[in-house]
Amino acid sequence: MHTGIVSPKGVWWVKAPKAERIWVMIAFAWCMVLFAMMPLWHYRGGQNPSGIRHKVDPEAYEARTLEFVEQYRVGEESGIAVVAPPPGSDIYMLGKMWQWIPVLKLQAGVSYTLHLSSSDVNHGFNLFPPNINFQVVPGYDYALRITPNEPGDYKVVCNEFCGIGHHLMLGRIIVEEGPVVAAGGIQ
Amino acid sequence: MNTTVAALAARFRTCPTTGLRVNSTAEHLIRLNAVFAILAMVAGVIAAFGLVLTRWQAVHLLEAVWYYRLLTVHGVSMLIFFIIFFEMAVLYFAGPVLLNSRVPMPKLAWAAFILMAVGAVMVEVQMWTGKADVLFTSYPPLRAHPNYYLGIIFFAVGALVVVGLFFASLVVAKREETYGGSVPLVTYGAIAAAVIAVITLLHGAAIYVPTWTWAMGWTAMPDPQVYRLIWWGLGHSSQQINVAAMVAVWYLLGALTVGAVVLNEKISRAAFFLYVLFISMASAHHLLVDPGFGSGWKIWNTSYAMYLAVLASMIHGFTVPAGIEVGQRLRGFTKGMFEWLRKAPWGDPGFSAMILSIIIFGFIGGITGVTFGTEQINIIAHNTLRVPGHFHATVVAGTALAFMGVTYYVIPLVFQKQVAFWPLARIQPYLFGGGMVLFTMSMTFAGTFGVPRRHYDISFTGAPFDIQYNAAVDLLLGIMGIGGLIAATAVVLYILIAVWSVFFGKPMPQAATAGE
């Protein structure tokens, strides 16, 4: 028996004590369970961040968002446009120092494709209160298929540091009663 | 033994505490790296007080600009400078000292140290003067002053040279037959850490060099998503250096404090080898909700690869305590199931730091980390306070606490001084560990309510809309503040004890007569 600061002499590639072998087997088996659950839950769990991903020019994305805002604009809140897009449409949210543009007015039980990107630095999309988070990276369009399942007043916190005004960056998504309220959530 | 070796032998001294011989170049470099690690820690802990007192929403001390500035200072000073300077000292200890050998090319070793020191000073200057308010991750298009990136490049190159010298010292020791048999397990663990360090530092070069040339205006900006991918090859892999070094320090402290034995060399070494093979891929879990990567890539890198690295930690989590038990039983504590545990040296800060490090790293850090590494759970954890809650349990309460514990042995072994303020030193690991448990658990729970990390003001004063977090969040942030203050105070005690012992401490008895 020797300590870890002594050079072991001779052959040390020998069978481990029984207790140690049992522990290694238990640990290995548990790791394999975790390993199997990763792909299994991806296919069976229905909780994946399965976005449609594209590269996009940041300026082009901003232009597309502003076009979308003009098209479906219904008002303004705290200086940010409020937009009510038609059910099933592609909807856009732009992270830009230090605003989420626009405020979205959606209907419960209706599916949308929510595009997220930035025209300057990295931002973090954090939906409050359900606590759902996505990284928003300039140059990449992260399109998420969503179905809001509960009417309510949701906020979008920026949770990636984006400069001195980071903590002022707060957006809003309003979900109103839809035609039929279906079970679901983010799909 | 040839004459060169015999001549070199004169440069060694024998440490009265452990009987290990200390090479003078190695000794000086261990000292200087330790001193610089402590200096970085001073910067880091000053920032820590500011951060804790600001995120404790009821206190909310700093202005926004200083909150973000100190957040950058805290991350870089602690996670890069403190920990890597300390690890350089660990490498000089695990190579030249443990193998009774020498530092090959001492001039290069000094040059590497100077490069690291210059780099660290450059970066600190940029951060404190507000020219690098980009946080630890410095994701472009956020841009710091070019000297910030250049300082990090200098530091990384210096560290890479030290790692190379460590490998060279192994070759020299083998050739000069300064030890018989295989390298000790602690050295093997340090080798694992050094291999991971090479992988890590190459990622660092691959991303900081183009970022620096961009900041100079010579090249285009790195793609933000590619930056995140390669940067995390540095940012997370460097934590794996810390894990491997920490586990090596567990074995070291076990040996020094209670004569812990290695149950089976094969199992413990195989576990270190698993870190080398698989742990770098675990970096992918930082990118689980990023747009740039597909599900297949995310699942592969965070399941198969990560879980084999987790297996390694689970093995060490058994073999280290089991080795302590067997060591204690060999010392005569054989009564019943737990006499070995009851009669353990709980008042020895080296021992208590090791045990607390094992427990907090494994049960809080390990479990939270494996949980977030899941594709679906990451959606509710990414960039919330759960993330710093996790890594303060791994790298702070785990690695930093283990390093504090080994410091109480470095002081008599390398600095030849008695540890000052011994009654304080005895409680310091408990204060730090206890503070960190409060801090990390309350951060983790606050994060489950969606409270963001790296955020100045969750009351959103001045924002266009309003948010009311769950009432429990205020309580949790209060506990976080108290735990953080306790832990930061324990860091101040640690610095005080270490600095006082080294500069004003009583010399070890017999130190004058030892060696030469």
Image (cartoon, coloured by chain):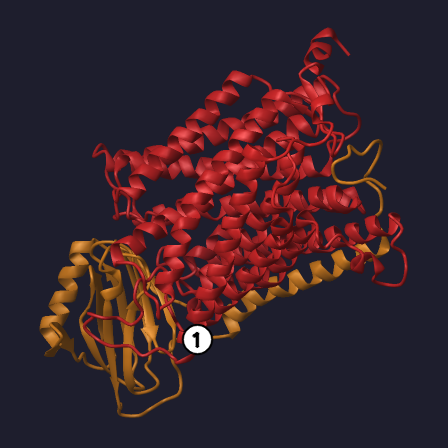
Q: Work out whether B122 lies above or below B497.
A: above
Image quarter of residue B127 = top left
Residue A8: image location, x then y, percent: 80, 34
Residue B354: image location, x then y, percent: 66, 51
Count of numbered labels shown in the rendering: 1
Q: Residues within 10 Å of mark 1 (few under 14, many from 20)?
A: some
Q: Work out whether B417 lies above or below A27.
A: above
Give the residue at x 47% y 35%: B36
Mark 1 sits on what residue? B475
Residue B174: image location, x then y, percent: 71, 22
> From the image, which quarter does the C terminus of chain B lie in?
top right
> In the rendered image of this protein, which colour is used for chain A?
orange
- Give, as a three-letter code, the residue at label 1: Leu
Image side of residue B58 versus residue B130, left or right: right
Q: Chain of mark 1?
A: B
In this rendered view, identify the residue nearer to me: B29 or B145.
Answer: B29
**Residue B375 visible, this angle:** no
Image side of residue B424 versus residue B71, left or right: right
Residue B472: image location, x then y, percent: 43, 78
Give the residue at x 53% y 28%: B162
Give the residue at x 54% y 33%: B503
Image quarter of residue A23 = bottom right
In this rendered view, identify the residue nearer to me: A8 or B418.
Answer: B418
> From the image, which quarter does the N terminus of chain B lie in?
top right
Chain shown red: that is: B
In this rendered view, identify the residue nearer to me: B502 or B67.
Answer: B502
